[in-house]
Image (cartoon, rainbow, N blue to C red):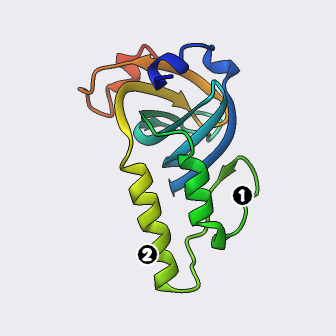
Amino acid sequence: MKLETAVFTRPTNEWVTRQVVVFDWHDGPREGIVWLDSPDCEFYFQLLAEKPTQDDLDDRLFRISEIPHGTVSNVLHAIRVLGEPSNNVWIPVWRFASDHDRHVAEAVIHENVNKKRETDLVIWTRDMKEFLGCWHSERNGTPESWFTKLGIVQ
């Protein structure tokens, strides 16, 4: 099932995260991969825009791309030397025993993530656990205008 079809089979407040591997984190996720149990799909995410909120959890909008089923498992296997995920949103500490181990793991990640298929989908979440919205949206716009463009006013 295409990602565009899968994500609209359920309201975003019913999405269930199976596993997230975060590649870039700064006060919250910025880039990584997600495996949802419901709807059953996997995607790559990259920060599009963010704005602070009163409760210190930034509202974040992400552009998502479809990745093949099995990508998250492949990446977890490639970085298993970093440990096991401690919860369903995992930010692995990038410390390998050798440069060779790091290069091998990064090659597997690169190979898998490069199979992504870009979409026009944008999601709204603060933590990749609770999803607040999903839209089809053209790729134009500046980070400052995305919240207004999608009608998110707070």
Mark 2, Cα crowd under 10 Å, few <14 / some 14-19 / many 20+, is few
87 displayed left or right of 71:
right
Indicate the position of residue 1 as horizontal and vertical percent values.
51, 22
Viewer-side label of 1, 2:
2
Q: Amino acid at mark 2?
A: His
Image: 117 above or below 97: above
Q: Helix or strand or loop: what does disc 1 sit on? A: loop
7 displayed left or right of 121:
right
Please indicate, yes or no, whether residue 34 appears anywhere in the rendered image.
yes
Q: Nearer the viewer, residue 81 or 138?
A: 81
Please indicate, yes or no, whether residue 28 appears anywhere in the rendered image.
no
Q: Are circles 1 and 2 on residues that touch, CB within 8 Å?
A: no
Identify the residue at image location x=43%, y=75%.
103
Q: Which residue is label 1 attached to?
A: 85
Label whose residue precedes the other's in the sequence (1 or 2): 1
Identify the residue at image location x=44%, y=17%.
135
Mark 1, Cα crowd under 10 Å, few <14 / some 14-19 / many 20+, is some
Image: 94 above or below 84: below
Indicate the position of residue 18 as horizontal and vertical percent values.
70, 39
Image: 126 above or below 12: below
Q: CA distance from mark 1 to mark 2?
A: 20 Å
Q: Amino acid at mark 1?
A: Pro
Name the residue furthest right: 86
Q: Quadrant of residue 83?
A: bottom right
Name the residue furthest left: 140
Residue 103, numbered circle: 2
Name the residue furthest bottom: 98
Q: Nearer the viewer, residue 146 or 31?
A: 31
Indicate the position of residue 128 as horizontal and vertical percent values.
61, 38
Indicate the position of residue 27 as horizontal and vertical percent values.
56, 51
Q: Helix or strand or loop: what does disc 2 sit on? A: helix
